[in-house]
Image (cartoon, rainbow, N blue to C red):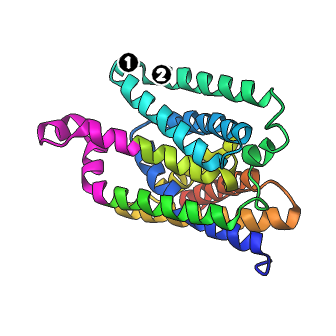
Amino acid sequence: MFQLDFMRNAFLAGLIISILCPIIGLFIVLRRNSMIGDTLSHSSFAGVSLGLVLGINPIITAFLFTSLCAIIIEALRGYFKKYAEMVMSIVLTFSLGIAIVLISTGKASTKVNSYLFGSILTVSKGDIILIAIAGLICLAILLLLYNKLIYVTFDEEGAYTTGINVKLINYLFTLIVGATISLSIRIMGILVISSIIVVPVATAMQLKLNFKNTLIFSVVFGFIDIMVGLITSYYINSAPGGTIALTSVFVLILTLILSKNRR
């Protein structure tokens, strides 16, 4: 299996995603903002469609369009503080509308399935380089903002009073979420990206640990979910996104059972 170039590429991409997605996922879950994953994943669908129609690398167009949508969401959240979910629904609807219109032209319909469901066959070395560079940049930004991001996540008003630029932190974090989703579409597929962002975090939370250890175990579970899912999808010839999503749910159920028995 590892003698095949496309499998090595898929595992390298999966390794980067398994680290990045659960890290941002923990902050998203603690902010009670899980819907942003679904919203931005559908936004990336419009970006992918645009790239396929224009003949540009879909990962690049997905990143640009998703980043734009992330900025719009964060900007509108200030105007609709009590109705944040409504803002995401509006952006999601707008993005899906663009994607459907572009795909209906017939210029992108033949290639769109690999982005919807994920494909280990289509991950190229160029994609690996792009994913690695963007992933390292996102991780570096998260590391720099780590303490401030924790403060903003748990007490946004308190962070304001201490002089932290909360608006800038929120914008940067939302952009990182958009970038992470754009990087994950090759492996996970647009329809189930949010599963690898949220489910490993939910699994780690069953262990009842402190923040730091929950973060570590979120990455561990994300790694297990993606690697087992990729290996399984190779042998049963299934879409990796769906297989990884099912694996993550099975691991969550197993953890729930084991943690309940331990208590």
Q: Which residue bears the numbered disc 1?
A: 80
Q: What span is in magenta?
A: 144-173
What is the distance, in whole Å, between disc 1 and disc 2 at their CAs?
7 Å
Q: Quick check: can you spot residue 206?
A: no
Q: How many marks?
A: 2
162 sits left or right of 15 in the view: left
Decide: is 200 above or below 13: above
- Is 177 covered by the magenta stretch? no
Decide: is 195 above or below 15: above
1 sits left or right of 256 in the view: right
| Rendered residue at 73%/28% (across/down) | 102
| Rendered residue at 58%/66% (across/down) | 129
Mark 1 near mark 2, Cβ–Cβ under 8 Å?
Answer: yes
Q: Quadrant of residue 50?
A: top right
Crowding near pointer 1: few (<14 within 10 Å), some, many (20+)?
few
Residue 87, numbered label: 2
Q: Quadrant of the N terminus?
A: bottom right
Dot 1: what SS? Answer: loop
Q: Amino acid at mark 1?
A: Phe
Q: Amino acid at mark 2?
A: Val
Q: Quadrant of residue 105?
A: top right
